[in-house]
Image: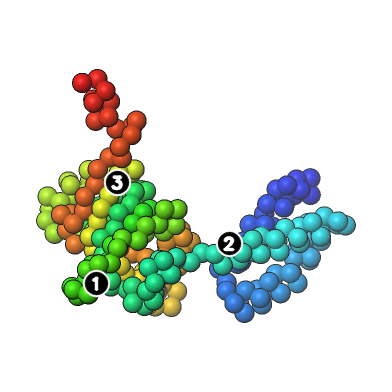
Amino acid sequence: MKGRPLLSFTICWLCGSGLACALTGWTLIWGMVGALACLPLLLRFMDVRGWSILFLLAAFVGGTVHWEWNDIRNHSSLPETIHIAADEMDGMAAEIQGELMSDVRIDGDRADFKIQMSSLLPISDSPTDTETAAVSLFNGSETLMVQVRLVEEEEQQVAAGWKRGDAITLKGSFASPGEARNFGGFDYRSYLRTLHIHWLFKVKGASSVTAAPQKGLGNSAFFGGLTG
């Protein structure tokens, strides 16, 4: 470790980032105090002296600050974009369009995948809302986790045909990811947050999904038109 300063710097940086990932608020502050109190003893045990100690302490603090700085910006822009409170979005029906960003994982009667949303059109039964226009997210600023409930066994084959990069249109509703119900249990909301995903989009039936390859040079139909 003493002869590999870059490795030591990287380890201290990752330790700082890991502490900020695991703790928040006052628990993070007290965790930092405890870690900084113990770190000099550890570095002395490793026979790290002089300016190297300050160098590695700066790496630890830098990793923590860098994580927190990025985490502050890790939030959903959807409520602000469509001018709806976050609690009102939970359960809101909509038609969305975007690009399929992951492989489709099929588990029994459910298919899961990620999309980069490009437009959104709220669906309402109220006649006064029929003039609502689609909201365009031209910068691709929102990634969603989609859950499609397959109502028939044959729909598994349909879902298997959806591919990464497809242009996709879905009709369903937004849902807030669930939190851990038991102490120490898996927190799905926190997990998705590390992926910068803040909303689920739940769809009933493969018939509510329309997917097609993107038009362009990679599309076989495009080459077929050139050669035809």
**What's the residue at 71%, 64% (across, down)?**
61
- How packed mark 3 is, by other alpha carbons closer than 10 Å (few <14, some 14-19, many 20 or more), is many
The quadrant of the rendering that contains the C terminus is top left
Please give the name of the residue rendered at 18% of the width and 54% of the height, measured from the top-left corner.
Answer: 206
First of labels 1, 3 by sequence position: 1
In contact (CB < 8 Å): disc 2 and disc 3:
no
Relative vertical location of residue 128 with respect to residue 221 in this rendering, above or below:
below
SS category of the residue bearing label 3 = strand
Could you tell me if residue 124 is visible in this image? yes
How far separated are the C-alphas under marks 2 and 1? 37 Å
Which mark lies nearer to you, 2 or 3?
A: 3
Residue marked by disc 2: 70
Residue 112, quarter of picture: bottom left
Residue 167 — which label?
3
Amino acid type indicated by mark 1: Asp
Q: Is residue 150 visible?
A: no
Q: Earlier in the sequence, mark 2 or mark 1?
A: 2
